[in-house]
Image: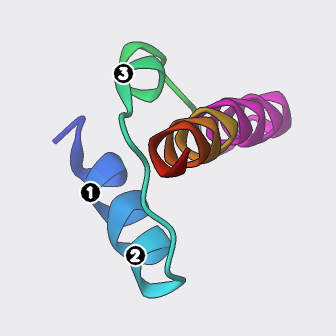
Amino acid sequence: MRQRWLLVLALVLARAGVALDGVSLLRRVTFQADEPQDALALTRYLDIHLVETRRNATSADS
């Protein structure tokens, strides 16, 4: 049950044409839906993963 949100997140991102190389940081942290600071933390972690994915894609193209 704890990983359902991660699956939903992956599906939502995939529909938007976004794929992440990995989600290890996201899997280690617990987020509470009713905590505004947790939403900000989730956004920061997603940004970290997106930057890393873009970096990996750029280096693979070189």
The image shows residue 29, relative to residue 4, as above or below, that is above
Residue 19 locus on image (x, y percent): 42, 61
Q: Does the magenta-highlighted stretch encompass residue 37?
A: yes
Q: Amino acid at mark 1?
A: Leu
- Mark 3 lies on residue: 24
Q: Assign the C terminus to one quadrant of the image.
A: top right
Residue 35 as seen in the image, left or right of residue 54: right
Q: Which circle marks residue 49 in the picture?
A: none
Residue kind at label 2, given as amino acid type? Ala
Disc number for residue 14: 2
**28 in the magenta segment:** no
- Range shown magenta: 34-49
Circle 3 SS class: helix
State which tag comes first along the sequence, 3 or 2: 2
Q: Nearer the viewer, residue 47 or 28?
A: 47
Going 74% across and 34% down the picture, which residue do you hit? 35
Q: What's the residue at 53%, 42% (across, down)? A: 53
Amino acid on which the number 3 mark rests in the picture: Ser
